Structures are given as structure tokens and as C-alpha cells.
Amino acid sequence: MIDKRKSWAINTCLNHPEHVKILQGNRPLIQPIYNSAKFTTTSEHPFSEQFIYGRVGNPTTRQLESAISEIQGREDTIIVSSGIAAISQTFLGLLNCGEHMISFRQIYKPARMFIRNHLGRFGIKNTIMSLSHLDQLESKITPETKLIHFESPTNPHLEVADIEAIIKIARKHGVHVSMDGTFGGLHQHKEFDIDVIIQSLTKFGNGHGDIIAGAISGRKELISKIRETSHYFGAHLDPQAAYLIMRGLKTYMIRYKHQCQTAEELARYLSHHPKIKKVMYPGLESHKGHSLARKQMTDMGAIMAFEIDPGVAESAEVFCHKLNLIQLAASVGSTESIICPTLQFFGLDLSTDEREELGINPFTVRLSVGLEDLKDLKEDFDSVLSV
Ligand SMILES: *Cc1c(COP(=O)(O)O)cnc(C)c1O
């Protein structure tokens, strides 16, 4: 090979650089990023066992898939380009034209919008009901129903779904269950027999606010089915991004636990504040889903919602802008604390009655707690609340 290179013109050499040889056993401690979109193949193995093309599989994203399966205690995972891609590909991978799915108003707004405004275009019917009326779930199931999709805890107001109750009804009718577990992080809910777990890795998985990505995990046969569909959506994740998530995951447990601890203390503090009307945090005894949360989760999460007294500011939006350290921004699960008004971000597609039921109003906010010191976060709130 070396000798042949000598006869090549420079542009041939530049386009076929030498591969650096690494002795067996002399492995890099951190696996390299496989940037290659294409892989050469060998006749020694069937094509189906080899990496061929980056949209269909890449060793770096594959490594992330195993890590996510492991932390979630699931058999297999597909990594995709966003949390919402994980949601849409799960639905389109599992549902056929003429079939029906059930979901809840208390889910992430873009997921609700996709179900309401787009599934019908593929002939997939849907029912959206309230998580507060689980007693009505069974009556919504028809012979066409193939999937129940829910979140726990929910975005933005942290309602806790009764996972066992939903699974029980689904099993009785042979319906699959998908759960978006983003708000509870990656390490919780392992013990539940949920068919498909969806995660926005944009949040706690990556954790540093610089990547958008999603994951679909579950039993092998269902994941294979969704994977097959997913190859034709082209929503694969770039290996550079997959690598950064792998790096973020190393500190996932430490970050998550620490963020939960600060969040719990802050939630208690705000719940006793005279200018705060109501705090929605699963770790507070006053939360309507508290006992369920204690049963289903070991960590109560780093996200809360609360309602300010109208005397504090003209609106939640004005309140958020008055804070100094905590920034008004989209998303959750970063190392910085982030706040947003829930009406503008999550409630504009809902009717007045629906908003009222979900507790979304002009004075409610969602807060994602980062890694700042509790003292500084409290001070930031105090500076605006003590007016
Ligand atoms: C953010 C979020 C998503 C969507 O994830 P993206 O990575 O932003 O596409 C889905 N579900 C929940 C609960 C989320 O918070």
C-alpha cells in the first residue's frame, strides 16, 4: 500500500489519507467519533451485520443507543434527531391508516399538536382526553385502538400519571403503551412494563443545552419495527452530537440528583412564600400526585411550575423578565436555571376550559433548576418577589 501511494498524484493521496494503525490492545480510552457517512464492507460478514451508511447506523450513535438502553433498563433504543422525532416516529412506526390512538391534554404541546393536526392526514384517528379522568380511559378504547401515549410527570405542570393503571387497561385490550419520560429523567420508571419509552435527550440526557436529540427505547421487536420506519424518515442523529451526549451522560446521575435536591428545597421555599400562590412539584406533600410520585419515582425531578400573586407583576412573562440570574428561555434540563410563562409557551392551542383544567393561566410559570447555588436562586426570586 505504502509503495503504491508513492506513485499516486497528490490529489489522489489527499483523498485517500493513510489510516493510522493502532496495535491490538492499544485502544483509545474514549471511543473515537466515527464521522464517516460511508463504510467499506467486507465479504467475510453479511451486509446486515455491517455498518454501511450513516443514516441507517453509525458506531458512535450505536454506542449512545446502548448507553440509553442500559440506563433505562430496556432491550433496545433508536437515537433520533429530536424528542419530537422520537414521538412522531413512534406513532407512525406503530400505527397504520384506519387505526386509533389515545392521548392526554396533559402532554408536551408539540406532541399534542402533532396528534391533533397531523396524524389524521395519515388516516390515523385519535382521542385526546384528560389525565385527571383515567376512569374514562377504558370507554375510549375502540377495536381500532392500538396505542395509548402519555407523559409522566407532564410538561409543563408536573402531573403524575398512574402508570400501572394505564398499563393494566392497555394490556386488557391488547393496546400498546408509549410513555414520554423526559421530565423524570432517564434512570427512573425502569420497573414498569411500558412498551415504548420516549426521551428528549435535549434535556437531562445531554444536559448542557447545546444539542437537540431524542431516543425511543423498549422491547426489541417493537423497536425493530419503529427502526424500520425511522430509516425512511431520515431523522438520524449526527455522530458529533451523539458523542457530546455520551460525554454529557457521564455526569448525568450527579447532575440530576443535585438538580433535584436544589429543586426540592427551592419548591419548599417558594411554597411558603406569601407572594407565590401555588407550587406544583411532585416532591411536595401538597402536590396532588405526591403519593403516586413517591411510589413511581426515587427522585422528584428538577422541574416545577408555580403561580405568582398578580400583585408581583402584570403577567408571568413580565415576572420572568424581571429575574436577573434565571433566564426566560425555552426548554429544560440545562445546567442553567430556565424559566418560562406556561400560557404563551404551552397553552395557546387550548380552549379556556382546557387551560383552566390544566391550571395554565397568565400568572403561571415553569422553572427548570440548574446547577447554580440555592442561595443565589433564592436571592434572584427574592429580589423580584419582595416588591
Ligand atoms: C422537550 C420535550 C420534547 C421534545 O423534545 P425536543 O428534543 O425538543 O424535540 C418532548 N417531550 C417532552 C416532555 C419535552 O419536554
Image (cartoon, rainbow, N blue to C red):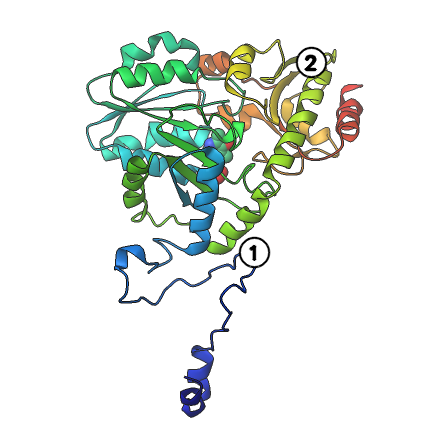
Q: Position of residue 309 (x, y in %)?
A: 68, 14
Q: Residue at x 62, y 27 (%)?
A: 302
Looking at the image, which is closer to me, 227 or 221? 221
The amino acid marked with disc number 2 is: Ser
Residue bearing the label numbered 2: 271
Q: Position of residue 319 (x, y in %)?
A: 69, 25
Q: Are marks 1 and 2 in contact (CB under 8 Å)?
A: no
Q: Is residue 134 left or right of residue 226?
A: right
Q: Is residue 61 left or right of residue 40?
A: right
| The image quarter in which residue 344 lies | top right
Mark 2, residues whose alpha carbon is within 10 Å: few (<14), some, or many (≥20)?
A: many
| Secondary structure at numbered mark 1 | loop
Decide if residue 365 is in sight here: no
270 w.r.t. 204: above or below = above
Crowd band around label 1 with a 10 angstrom C-alpha radius: few (<14), some (14–19), many (20+):
few
Q: Is residue 322 above or below residue 69?
A: above
Q: Looking at the picture, tell me which residue is in the foreground, 43 or 210.
A: 43
Name the one closer to the observer, 283 or 126. 283
Residue 30 circle label: 1
User: Is 216 drawn above or below residue 306 in the view shown?
Assistant: below
Instruction: Give the farthest residue toward the bottom.
Output: 7
- Res. 228 image quadrant: top left
The answer to whether residue 280 is visible is yes
Q: Nearer the viewer, mark 1 or mark 2?
A: 1
Q: Position of residue 285 (x, y in %)?
A: 62, 10
- Mark closest to the chain's N terminus, 1 or 2: 1
Using the image as rendered, state which of residue 332 and residue 360 is in the foreground. Answer: 332
How far apart marks 1 and 2 lie (CA) works out to 44 Å
> Where residue 58 appears, x then y in whole percent?
40, 55
The quadrant of the image that shows the N terminus is bottom left
Q: Where the C terminus falls, by quadrant?
A: top right
